Image (tube, coloured by chain):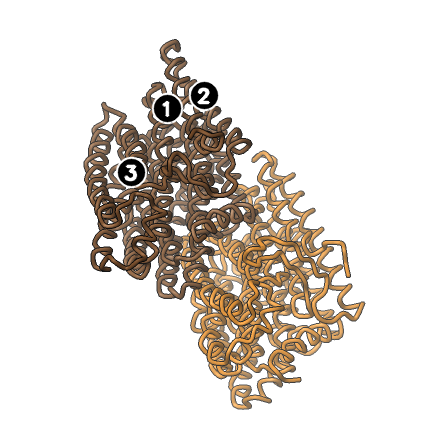
């Protein structure tokens, strides 16, 4: 049963596990001020894992391994690469976090959740899927509440945990009903059972709602988004960045596979539900982002809105739609990690998180201001940054599927988005500090931040200009969902 | 035919130069400016070379073609080429970029606050990003890339206005401008995407190639429906009435070089894209709705001129005169006949140079007198003679005097309109009288009336760089006025192509 192919299919996970063990071994020997080195180990290790996986763990034909638990295909592989990239960057950003960065556990928890996300992207069985989701979630609950001395963080962790488990159980109920109706837990077999038409559409609809509740919570779409702003604001900033990018993308990886592969026969009902949710999500997210004064809360609501844009691609239910979802997530991961990374780097020096505190940043650290420009313009969907192309692809898929009204809603929302993203840039570039002596208040970057932020900035521009390779990989992954 | 990728170089040079400028240390202001000037000069020479080649070789159709695969799965290519319509606009961009850098040079040791003193590094980088986007739109033959560059040209405007603009209105004006233009462009985007998929249904080819889209076989009903959003979406940037509202505010709030770019080039971007995508890809729709465009344009022409007439702020006066003159461009386009379209093509160039000159001189006056209010100014002719001559030449162009490029442009426009709707031509021609009135009033007041006492002794002449800019801009207005053959036949070849698409000629 354990062939080289099986081994290759979970190669990244095996390596991540070994990396975790390495940290466990080294951590006790390091003195407290050396423990941030675990961050270098995690980031560097993940980088090496990515290279090894690219060399030896690339999927060819889609195959089921480990007794049908895992689907070894390009879609999952592409997602895994994205998660590991996000994990590596998050490790770098964690390093200079004052309280979380000096403790080895935080990196260990990060790796554990990464393990779960990777498995989420490749699970082809409901049981495996549920295990993967929980493996990813539990470390994140802890990470969100990691700063025990900080009431906000404790609250964030607790809130995330309570709502998360509630949503999970509802989803689990949905899963069990799917199993009950179809008699199988294999995603690729469920479709054939449902296709036979023995199950009434109404029942299918009910099950669908249960599953959407659980997954909707993961990706923070309205009305399951209410936890996001409090949790993002309270969590350590790098963790918030990780939650809003990798964790969200993992949720979408599951949504795409589950809906496209297992439930295509109910497409007429779920596209309609999701179209409505997408429209509401975009609008609510953007309108609530407008009045925010805290940068992390603004990013939280904007991340809700972005989940809505991604849903347009899901609703399109086509190859281009799926490809645009994957592409969007890739662009979004880079962009939002950059935005959170800057928020982290800024608050580490200044201890401030309000948007108005960014006044004069363009004089305090011009390069950081430029990176912020790239991040926020990409979020707003302006070229030559990744967000622009991503949005066009999603809208193109929407138009192709004849969801023109939804695309129009999306476009109106992008306009609202442009307003508040530019507003932040106005503080960065136009306003000055109260006594206009920015030179006396520089915002220096430590080495891990400089590396992470520069890599991300280049990534944002790269995804937005040289988009052909990314799109090719996204499209290849999407192709597999329909064949 | 050409293997040398000249259009790519023209387009990407500003991006590269902007990147280099950003890498310079912030304290090296003069080196930053020198690099900016070198890049702008090179771009001007290259675009002039393209123009002259096109002219002297008697070229027709799309030339200097370059095509690189970009995203084959969706049929996106980097497809560049110019025709008789866009080659003058590329040259125009080169001219405005060059003179814009000269005007923004800034001199730290003089007592006048001219040019850009504060963070020139970021200023030039953003300005060049804008310039690169503009070049990209004019040379793109791929609809996706056209849109890509269009958006690149829009957002630096926000930063340029909000950071270096006029302190009183910059925040309001910059946000208003950006939102207006963004709304306009995304409205067109929906139309563009629908066109893309319809072409795919009709021909089975996934492609954003506009030359192929011209024969995509869009049904008449389709064209009737989608022409308006596509045309008007782009025309917002062209300052078409009733969506012109952002434009005078934007002009006024922007720093001098940005006003020049904005009125001189960016507004052409809107008119050009509306023509290229709206009229040329949806000709049936254009015929159906030309009466509406003509009405809007005629209102813009007269209304803009009248509002300009009553302004007391020099910059607002020029801002509204731009609305009026861009109305003439739209009027020319709305005729859909050879004469009118040729006039519109020349007017785009002529107005670009003229308004850039106006804004440059207004900027020079403001830098020295610290006011733009017409009643507070006077006697500039003695102190800045060359600027006075420049303003007068610009004024003559604006009035459409024979011997200047304005006449070469406006005469065919009115002829073309007369052919279609003589009444509109009569109404619109009222604007010529109003324009003549406000231009002459202003020349008399600002330049030839006695100088107010509080300005006496404080105001000096313009710098050498300013003079170079004035001479360069005037040169083009005069040469086209005296020898229309350097531009009109070339534009006419571009128009013939449009006429073919419209099914006439």
Q: Secondary structure at mark 1?
A: helix
In which quadrant of the rendered image does the N terminus of chain B lie? Answer: bottom right
Q: CA distance from mark 2 to mark 1?
A: 9 Å
Q: Is residue A356 left or right of residue B52?
A: left
**Residue pointed to by mark 1:** A107
Are callouts 1 and 3 both on one chain?
Answer: yes
Which residue is situated farthest in the right direction here? B57
Chain A representation colour: brown
Q: Is residue A463 visible?
A: yes
Q: Is residue A209 left or right of residue B310?
A: left
User: Which tag is nearer the camera, tag 3 or tag 2?
Assistant: 3
Identified at 23% across, 40% down, the residue is A168
Q: Residues within 10 Å of mark 1 (few under 14, many from 20)?
A: many
Identified at 37% across, 24% down, the residue is A107
Q: Secondary structure at mark 2?
A: helix
User: Which tag is nearer the camera, tag 1 or tag 3?
Assistant: 3
**Residue pointed to by mark 3:** A127
Q: Residues within 10 Å of mark 2 (few under 14, many from 20)?
A: some
Residue A191 drawn above or below residue B354:
above
Instruction: Tell me which corner region of the image, top left, top right, bottom left or bottom right, holds residue B361.
Output: bottom right
Task: Tell me which label, 1 or 3, sits earlier in the chain.
Answer: 1
Chain B representation colour: orange
Q: Nearer the viewer, residue A291 or B427?
A: A291
**Residue pointed to by mark 2:** A41
The picture places residue B49, in percent across and down from the top left corner, at: 76, 59
Q: Nearer the viewer, residue A315 or A243?
A: A315
Q: Nearer the viewer, residue B101 or B133?
A: B133
Residue A458 drawn above or below residue B503:
above
Q: CA distance from mark 1 to mark 3?
A: 27 Å
In which quadrant of the rendered image does the C terminus of chain B lie? Answer: bottom right
The picture places residue B303, in percent across and down from the top left corner, at: 46, 77
């Amino acid at each position: 049963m354990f062939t080289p192919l099986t081994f290759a299919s979970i190669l990244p996970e095996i390596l991540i596990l070994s990396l975790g063990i390495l940290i466990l071994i080294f951590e006790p020997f390091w003195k407290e001020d050396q423990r941030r080195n675990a961050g270098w180990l995690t980031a560097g290790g993940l980088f090496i894992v990515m290279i090894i996986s690219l060399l030896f763990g690339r999927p060819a034909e889609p195959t089921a391994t480990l007794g049908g638990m895992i689907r070894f295909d390009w879609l999952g592989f592409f997602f895994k690469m994205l998660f590991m990239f996000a994990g590596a960057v998050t490790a770098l950003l964690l390093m200079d976090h004052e309280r979380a960065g000096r403790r080895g556990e935080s990196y260990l928890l990060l790796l554990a959740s990464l393990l779960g996300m990777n498995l989420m992207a490749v699970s082809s069985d409901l049981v495996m899927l549920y295990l993967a989701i929980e493996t990813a979630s539990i470390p994140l609950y802890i990470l969100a509440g990691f700063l025990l001395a900080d009431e906000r963080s404790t609250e964030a962790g607790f809130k995330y945990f309570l709502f998360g488990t509630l949503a999970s159980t509802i989803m689990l109920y949905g899963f069990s009903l799917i199993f009950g109706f179809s008699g199988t837990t294999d995603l690729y077999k469920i479709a054939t059972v449902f296709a036979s038409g023995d199950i009434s559409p109404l029942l299918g609809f009910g099950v669908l709602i249960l599953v959407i509740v659980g997954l909707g919570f993961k990706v923070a779409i309205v009305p399951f988004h209410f936890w996001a702003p409090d949790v993002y604001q309270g969590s350590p900033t790098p963790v918030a960045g990780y939650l809003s990018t990798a964790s969200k993308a993992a949720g979408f990886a599951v949504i795409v596979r589950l809906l496209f592969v297992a439930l295509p026969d109910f497409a007429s009902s779920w596209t309609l539900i999701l179209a409505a949710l997408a429209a509401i999500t975009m609008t609510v997210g953007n309108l609530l982002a407008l009045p925010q004064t805290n940068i992390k809360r603004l990013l939280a609501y904007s991340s809700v809105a972005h989940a809505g844009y991604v849903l347009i691609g899901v609703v399109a239910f086509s190859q281009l739609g799926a490809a645009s979802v994957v592409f969007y997530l890739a662009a979004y991961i880079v962009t939002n990690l950059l935005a959170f990374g800057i928020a982290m780097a800024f608050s580490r020096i200044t201890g401030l998180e309000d948007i108005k505190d960014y006044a004069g940043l363009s004089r305090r650290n011009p390069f950081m201001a430029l990176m912020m420009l790239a991040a926020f313009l990409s979020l707003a969907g302006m070229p030559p940054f990744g967000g622009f192309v991503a949005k066009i692809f999603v809208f193109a898929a929407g138009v192709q599927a004849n969801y023109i009204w939804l695309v129009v809603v999306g476009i109106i929302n992008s306009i609202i988005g442009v307003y508040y993203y530019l507003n932040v840039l106005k503080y960065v570039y136009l306003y000055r500090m109260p006594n206009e002596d920015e030179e006396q208040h520089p915002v220096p970057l430590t080495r891990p931040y400089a590396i992470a932020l520069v890599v991300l900035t280049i990534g944002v521009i790269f995804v937005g200009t040289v988009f052909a390779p990314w799109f090719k990989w996204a499209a290849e992954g999407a192709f597999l969902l329909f064949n | 035919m050409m293997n040398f990728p000249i259009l790519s170089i023209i387009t990407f040079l500003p991006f590269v130069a902007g990147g280099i400028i950003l890498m310079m240390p912030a304290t090296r202001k003069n080196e930053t400016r020198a690099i900016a000037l070198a890049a702008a000069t090179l771009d001007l020479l290259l675009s002039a070379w393209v123009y002259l080649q096109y002219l002297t070789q008697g070229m027709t159709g799309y030339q200097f073609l370059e095509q690189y695969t970009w995203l084959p799965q969706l049929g996106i290519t980097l497809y560049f080429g110019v025709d008789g319509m866009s080659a003058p606009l590329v040259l125009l961009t080169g001219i405005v970029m060059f003179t814009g850098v000269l005007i923004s040079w800034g001199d730290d040791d003089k007592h006048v606050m001219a040019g850009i003193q504060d963070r020139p590094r970021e200023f030039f980088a953003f300005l060049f990003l804008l310039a690169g986007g503009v070049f990209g739109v004019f040379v793109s033959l791929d609809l996706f890339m056209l849109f890509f560059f269009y958006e690149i040209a829009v957002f630096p405007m926000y930063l340029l206005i909000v950071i270096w603009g006029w302190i009183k209105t910059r925040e309001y004006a910059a946000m208003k401008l950006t939102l207006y233009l963004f709304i306009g462009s995304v409205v067109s985007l929906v139309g563009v995407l629908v066109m893309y998929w319809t072409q795919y249904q009709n021909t089975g080819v996934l492609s954003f190639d506009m030359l192929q889209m011209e024969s995509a076989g869009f049904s008449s009903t389709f064209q009737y429906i989608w022409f308006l959003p596509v045309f008007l979406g782009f025309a917002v940037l062209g300052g078409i009435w009733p969506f012109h509202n952002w434009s005078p505010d934007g002009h006024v709030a922007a720093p001098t070089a940005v006003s020049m770019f904005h009125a001189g080039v960016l507004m052409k971007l809107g008119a050009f894209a509306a023509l290229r995508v709206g009229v040329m890809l949806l000709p049936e729709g254009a015929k159906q709705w030309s009466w509406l465009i003509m009405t809007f344009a005629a209102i813009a022409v007269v209304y803009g001129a009248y509002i300009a007439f009553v302004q007391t702020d020099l910059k607002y006066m020029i801002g509204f005169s731009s609305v009026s003159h861009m109305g003439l461009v739209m009027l020319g386009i709305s005729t859909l006949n050879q004469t009118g379209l040729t006039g519109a093509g020349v007017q785009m160039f002529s107005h670009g140079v003229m308004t850039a000159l106006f804004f440059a001189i207004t900027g020079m006056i403001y830098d020295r007198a610290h006011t733009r209010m017409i009643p507070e100014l006077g006697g500039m002719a003695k102190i800045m003679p060359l600027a006075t001559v420049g303003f007068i030449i610009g004024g003559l162009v604006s009035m459409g005097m024979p011997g200047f490029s304005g006449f070469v442009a406006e005469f065919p426009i009115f002829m073309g309109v007369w052919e279609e709707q003589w009444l509109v031509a009569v109404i619109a021609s009222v604007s010529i009288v109003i324009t003549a009135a406000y231009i002459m009033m202003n020349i008399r007041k600002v330049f030839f009336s006695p100088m107010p006492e509080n300005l006496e002794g404080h105001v000096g002449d313009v710098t050498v760089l300013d003079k170079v800019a004035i001479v360069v801009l005037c040169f083009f207005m005069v040469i086209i006025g005296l020898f229309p053959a350097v531009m009109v036949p070339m534009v006419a070849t571009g128009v013939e192509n449009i006429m073919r698409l419209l099914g006439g000629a």
